C-alpha cells in the first residue's frame, strides 16, 4: 500500500480547535490512551495520535479510491450539514446530511425502491410529465419529490452498498455506525472524548463540535479521495 | 440473490471460515475489537462483494495495528512540539471576555459564530444590535464576517457559548455621545416615547431624555411622537445611563444668523400675562407686553390672539439659554398703531426697521464724532451715557 505525505500541520489543527475535548465529567474512560491533558475543566486530545490516525486513514482512503471503491459520508448535525454536502460533492462521493433513516443500509432493498421512485419522479419532472396530471396530483407528487430530495438527495446515484463509510460524529450517528458494523462495512469515524474508540475500524480522535475542526478533517480525507480517484482514472 | 447473502451476514451463525478468528490472537485488544464479527455463512463466502469487503476490513485492521506499533510514523511533529503549542494556544472563555470569531451560519433567530473553542457560539438576534431587528442580516451579520464578540453566557447542554455584540456597541455609542458633547454638535433624534416631564428621543441607538422645557416648538407629546428633532447633548452619564438632550439649544444655534434688528414673520403661540410667545422659524421668542406698542396695553388679548401672524423685530438673543427677545414697538409708523391698526404695522414693518437701524447707526456715529471732537485737554470726556465728566486716566469710552 502506498504511503504518502499528507500535509497534516500542527498549527492548522490547533487553530481549528481540533485538540479540544468535552468536559472532564463527560468522558469515556476508553479514550484514556488518546487524551493528553486536562485544562480548565476540559480534556485535551493528543494531537500526535490524531495526526497518526488521520494520515493512516488518508492512505487507506487513497488506496481504496484508486481501486474505484464507493464512499459514503454521514453527518446529520444541522451545523455541519452543508459542510458535509460540499465536501462530498467535491470528492464525488455519496453523503447523508439529513436524518439517517433507520435501516438505510441494512434494509437496502427498501431504500433501493425509494431511490427508483425518486429517479422516476425526477425524470418525469424533467420531461414535463407532471403537467399531464391534474393539479392536486401534481402538487402531491412535487411534495413527494421535495421530501425525497431532502432525505435521499445525497445518495441518489448509489447503486449498491458503499465500500467505506466516513462518519462525522459517533454520538449522533450511532445508528449508522451500528448498521455498518453488522454489515461488515469498514468505517472511519471522528471520535471525541465521550465516544467509544473500539466501535469503528479507524477512529480519529478530534473535536466533533467545532465546525472548523470537522471541516479540516473532512478536507484532508476528501483531498485523499480526489487524488486516489484521479490516479484511478489515469490507470484505466 | 445478493439480498439473501446479505440477510445471512446479520445472523449469529458459528463461523465456518472466518478470517478474523483464524488469525493468531496476538493481543487482548484484538479480541475486544472483534466482538461483533461479521458472520458469513458458507453460501455467502463465495459472494465477491463480501470477499472484497473482508479484504478491505483486513487492510483497516492492519492499518490500526500499524498505528499502535509505530505511533510516530507519518507525523510531522513531536509530542514536545504539541505541548509547547498548547501553551501558545491557551484559551480563556470566561464571561465578559472579548473573542474574535467568524460567522458561518445565519438564520432568522440568530447566527452561529465559530470561535476557536470546543463548540461554536450562538448569537441571538436580540443581542446582535442595539436597535431591534427581525433578522441578523440587517445588522450586517452574514456568513464569513470576522468580528469581535463578547461572551455573555454558556450553554451547559452542548458546551457552547452565548455571545453578544450589544454590549460592545453600547460602549461605543456612549463614547460617541461623549465626543459629540465635547464637540457640541447637533444630532437628529427620533421621538420614541413620552413621560410626565418630557419625551424620549433615540440618539446613536441610546434613549435620551428631553424635558418639555427644553423643547422649543410648542407641541404636546402625542404630536411629537415619531418626529425627528435637531438635538444637542446636555449631559452624558454612562454609569447612571443618563443622557439629557436639548432641542432649544440646537434651534438657537441654527438661528444665530438672525441678527439683532432684523425683521421676521412669526405666529403667536401662546399668551401670558407678561407678554406673548411668538414662534419664529422654530424657536420661541418672547414679545413682552411693554414692547408691543408705545401706548399702554391693559389686556393683550385685545391686541393679539394665538395664531396671529405678525412681523416682529429681534431685540436680542441669549444663545446659552436659547431665548430671543422681540419687539414690535419700533415698527410702528405712529405710536399706538399696533392697537389701532395692526395691518398697517405689518405692511410698514420693513420700512420702520430700516429707519430704526439708520437711527441707531446715526446715534452711534454721532457719539463717536463727539468723542473725537471733544478735546481731551479740557479735562472732560463724554462717557457712553452721554454725560460730561472729568477726564480720568482710564478713559471710559
Image (cartoon, rainbow, N blue to C red):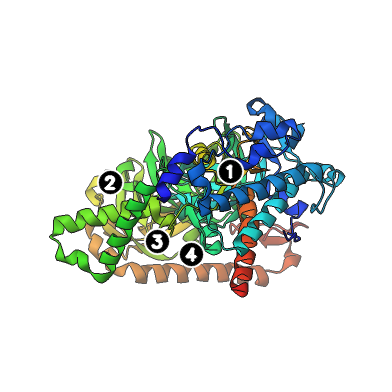
Q: Chain of mark 4?
A: B
Q: Which residue is mark 1?
A: B120
Name the residue nearer the viewer: B45 or A52: B45
Distance Cα–Cα, label 4 vs label 2:
27 Å
Mark in front: 4 vs 1: 1
Q: Which residue is mark 3?
A: B313
Mark in front: 4 vs 3: 4
Could you tell which of marks 4 and 2 lies nearer the N-terminus?
4
Q: Are marks 1 and 3 in contact (CB under 8 Å)?
A: no
Same-chain check, marks 1 and 3: yes
Name the residue nearer the viewer: B100 or A89: A89
**Residue positioned most to the top:** A25
- x%, y% of residue B49? 52, 53
Could you tell which of marks 1 and 3 lies nearer the N-terminus?
1
Same-chain check, marks 4 and 1: yes
Distance Cα–Cα, label 1 vs label 2:
73 Å
Mark in front: 1 vs 2: 1
Same-chain check, marks 1 and 2: yes
Could you tell which of marks 3 and 2 lies nearer the N-terminus?
2
- Regarding residue B352, the answer to whether it shows in the image is yes
Q: Does B327 sit left or right of B52 as displayed? A: left
Same-chain check, marks 3 and 2: yes
Q: Which residue is mark 2?
A: B300
Q: Are marks 1 and 2 in contact (CB under 8 Å)?
A: no
Could you tell which of marks 4 and 1 lies nearer the N-terminus?
1
Distance Cα–Cα, label 1 vs label 3:
68 Å
**Can you tell which quarter of the image residue B71 is in?**
top right
Q: Which residue is mark 4?
A: B259
| Disc 3 element | strand
| Disc 2 element | helix
- x%, y% of residue B35? 61, 32
Q: Are marks 3 and 2 in contact (CB under 8 Å)?
A: no
Amino acid at each position: 500500500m502506498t504511503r504518502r505525505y499528507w500535509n497534516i500541520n500542527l498549527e492548522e489543527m490547533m487553530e481549528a480547535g481540533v485538540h479540544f475535548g468535552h468536559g472532564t465529567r463527560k468522558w469515556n474512560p476508553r479514550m484514556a490512551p488518546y487524551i493528553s491533558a486536562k485544562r480548565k475543566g476540559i480534556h485535551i486530545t493528543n494531537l500526535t495520535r490524531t495526526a497518526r490516525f488521520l494520515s493512516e486513514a488518508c492512505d487507506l482512503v487513497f488506496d481504496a479510491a484508486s481501486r474505484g471503491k464507493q464512499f459514503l459520508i454521514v453527518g446529520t448535525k444541522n451545523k455541519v450539514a452543508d459542510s458535509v454536502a460540499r465536501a462530498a460533492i467535491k470528492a464525488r462521493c455519496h453523503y447523508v446530511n439529513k436524518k439517517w433513516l433507520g435501516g438505510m443500509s441494512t434494509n437496502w432493498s427498501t431504500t433501493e425502491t425509494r431511490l427508483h421512485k425518486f429517479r422516476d419522479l425526477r425524470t418525469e419532472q424533467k420531461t414535463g410529465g407532471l403537467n399531464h396530471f391534474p393539479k392536486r396530483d401534481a402538487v402531491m407528487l412535487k411534495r413527494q419529490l421535495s421530501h425525497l430530495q431532502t432525505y435521499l438527495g445525497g445518495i441518489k446515484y448509489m447503486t449498491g452498498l458503499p465500500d467505506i463509510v466516513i462518519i462525522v460524529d459517533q454520538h449522533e450517528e450511532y445508528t449508522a455506525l451500528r448498521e455498518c458494523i453488522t454489515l461488515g462495512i469498514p468505517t472511519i469515524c471522528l471520535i471525541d472524548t465521550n465516544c467509544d474508540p473500539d466501535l469503528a475500524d479507524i477512529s480519529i480522535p478530534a473535536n466533533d463540535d467545532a465546525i472548523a475542526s470537522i471541516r479540516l478533517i473532512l478536507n484532508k480525507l476528501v483531498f485523499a479521495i480526489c487524488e486516489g480517484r484521479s490516479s484511478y482514472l489515469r490507470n484505466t | 440473490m445478493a439480498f439473501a447473502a446479505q440477510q445471512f451476514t446479520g445472523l449469529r451463525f458459528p463461523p465456518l471460515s472466518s478470517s478474523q478468528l483464524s488469525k493468531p490472537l496476538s493481543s487482548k485488544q484484538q479480541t475486544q475489537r472483534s466482538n461483533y464479527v461479521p458472520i458469513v455463512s458458507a453460501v455467502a463466502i463465495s459472494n465477491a462483494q463480501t470477499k472484497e469487503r473482508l479484504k478491505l476490513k483486513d487492510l483497516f485492521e492492519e492499518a490500526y495495528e500499524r498505528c499502535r506499533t509505530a505511533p510516530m510514523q507519518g507525523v510531522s511533529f513531536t509530542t514536545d512540539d504539541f505541548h509547547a503549542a498548547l501553551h501558545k494556544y491557551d484559551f480563556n472563555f470566561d464571561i465578559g471576555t472579548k473573542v474574535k470569531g467568524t460567522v458561518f451560519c445565519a438564520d432568522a433567530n440568530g447566527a452561529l459564530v465559530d470561535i476557536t473553542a470546543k463548540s461554536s457560539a450562538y448569537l441571538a438576534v436580540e443581542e446582535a444590535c442595539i436597535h431591534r431587528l427581525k433578522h441578523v442580516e440587517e445588522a450586517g451579520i452574514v456568513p464569513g464576517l470576522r468580528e469581535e464578540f463578547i461572551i455573555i453566557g454558556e450553554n451547559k447542554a452542548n458546551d457552547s457559548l452565548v455571545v453578544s455584540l450589544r454590549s460592545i456597541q453600547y460602549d461605543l455609542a456612549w463614547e460617541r455621545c461623549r465626543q459629540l458633547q465635547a464637540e457640541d454638535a447637533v444630532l437628529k433624534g427620533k421621538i420614541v416615547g413620552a413621560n410626565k416631564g418630557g419625551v424620549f428621543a433615540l440618539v446613536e441607538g441610546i434613549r435620551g431624555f428631553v424635558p418639555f422645557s427644553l423643547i422649543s416648538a410648542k407641541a404636546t407629546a402625542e404630536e411629537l411622537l415619531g418626529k425627528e428633532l435637531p438635538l444637542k447633548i446636555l449631559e452624558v452619564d454612562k454609569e447612571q445611563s443618563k443622557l439629557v438632550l436639548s432641542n432649544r439649544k440646537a434651534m438657537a444655534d441654527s438661528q444665530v444668523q438672525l441678527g439683532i434688528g432684523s425683521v421676521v414673520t412669526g405666529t403667536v403661540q401662546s399668551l401670558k400675562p407678561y407678554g406673548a410667545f411668538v414662534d419664529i422659524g422654530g424657536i420661541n421668542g418672547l414679545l413682552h407686553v411693554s414692547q408691543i406698542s408705545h401706548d399702554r396695553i391693559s389686556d393683550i388679548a385685545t391686541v393679539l390672539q394665538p395664531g396671529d401672524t405678525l412681523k416682529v423685530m429681534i431685540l436680542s438673543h441669549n444663545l446659552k439659554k436659547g431665548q430671543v427677545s422681540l419687539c414690535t414697538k419700533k415698527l410702528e409708523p405712529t405710536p399706538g398703531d399696533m392697537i389701532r391698526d395692526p395691518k398697517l404695522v405689518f405692511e410698514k414693518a420693513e420700512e420702520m426697521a430700516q429707519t430704526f437701524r439708520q437711527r441707531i447707526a446715526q446715534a452711534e456715529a454721532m457719539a463717536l464724532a463727539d468723542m473725537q471732537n471733544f478735546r481731551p485737554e479740557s479735562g472732560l470726556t463724554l462717557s457712553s451715557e452721554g454725560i460730561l465728566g472729568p477726564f480720568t486716566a482710564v478713559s471710559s469710552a
